[in-house]
Image (cartoon, rainbow, N blue to C red):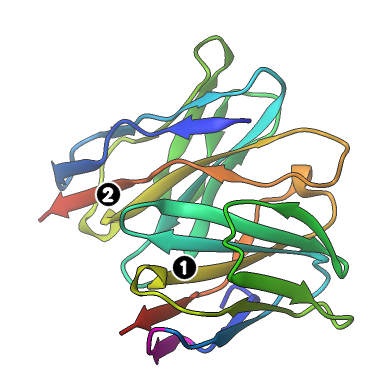
Amino acid sequence: DSGVTQTPKHLITATGQRVTLRCSPRSGDLSVYWYQQSLDQGLQFLIQYYNGEERAKGNILERFSAQQFPDLHSELNLSSLELGDSALYFCASSPRQLANYGYTFGSGTRLTVV
Amino acid sequence: AQSVSQHNHHVILSEAASLELGCNYSYGGTVNLFWYVQYPGQHLQLLLKYFSGDPLVKGIKGFEAEFIKSKFSFNLRKPSVQWSDTAEYFCAVIPISNFGNEKLTFGTGTRLTIIP
């Protein structure tokens, strides 16, 4: 157990639907990062939050959004889902001074869009 | 923006063989470097990291990596692999800055298959 909790572990949904993925960071970590892992694109950075505020954006589609709540858990919302959104979605967390630490990853949510 | 290249997409070795996985990055400034491993069906786990000092760093499970600044490389090595090393290996880089928006950039990964 890495200390980063992601729910659900698996999600199967239909095209056009909306889902919410949840992440609880490791205790004491203020930053949360979302990554998408697919076979053809590898690990793609989506978005980072630090202490409730968005800090960096990567290759995140407009149909996707995220937020970090006061208790530091984060949610990634995926809407108008397409078949191509099927992937593993990882959350990672780190303390403020990332330069001195690596990320700690959660176990991921496997999303299958049918 | 920084980028990371892992030229070996799939490596197949027999048990007890020696391993070296290549990693090159492009970034003009100071970086921290990481290797992560992802066992089948599991999340990414940190193998080792380099921040400064001795360019030869040792990680878990007998892995080590060498940072060669002049070559922008951070290759992963293991003298004798085991079947349990079958996994995907990711090199990652983060630039050092004071802006607070640092993020890890990952390479595309190298799939390692060990044949018993």
Q: Is residue B3 left or right of residue A83?
A: right
Quadrant of the image occupied by residue B26? top right
**Residue at (65% x, 76% y) in the render:** A3
Dot 1: chain letter = B
Q: Which residues are magenta?
A: A9-15
**Residue at (72% x, 50% y) in the render:** A101
Residue A31 magenta? no
The percent position of residue B16, horizontal first and vertical second, equals 18, 43
Kindly state the secondary structure of the residue where label 2 is placed: strand
Kindly state the secondary structure of the residue where label 1 is placed: loop
> Answer yes or no: do the residues labelled 2 and 1 have beta carbons within 8 Å?
no
Number of residues whose C-alpha sits closer than 10 Å to that of mark 2, classed few (under 14), some (14–19) or many (20 or more): many
The percent position of residue A45, horizontal first and vertical second, equals 58, 54
Instruction: Tell me the residue that label 2 is attached to.
Output: B111
Of mark 2 and mark 1, the one earlier in the sequence is 1
Residue A12 magenta? yes
In the depicted structure, whether residue B24 falls above or below residue A103 = above
- Between the residue at mark 2 and the residue at mark 1, the CA separation in whole angstroms equals 15 Å
Quarter of the picture containing the N terminus of chain A is bottom right
**Amino acid at the residue labelled 1:** His
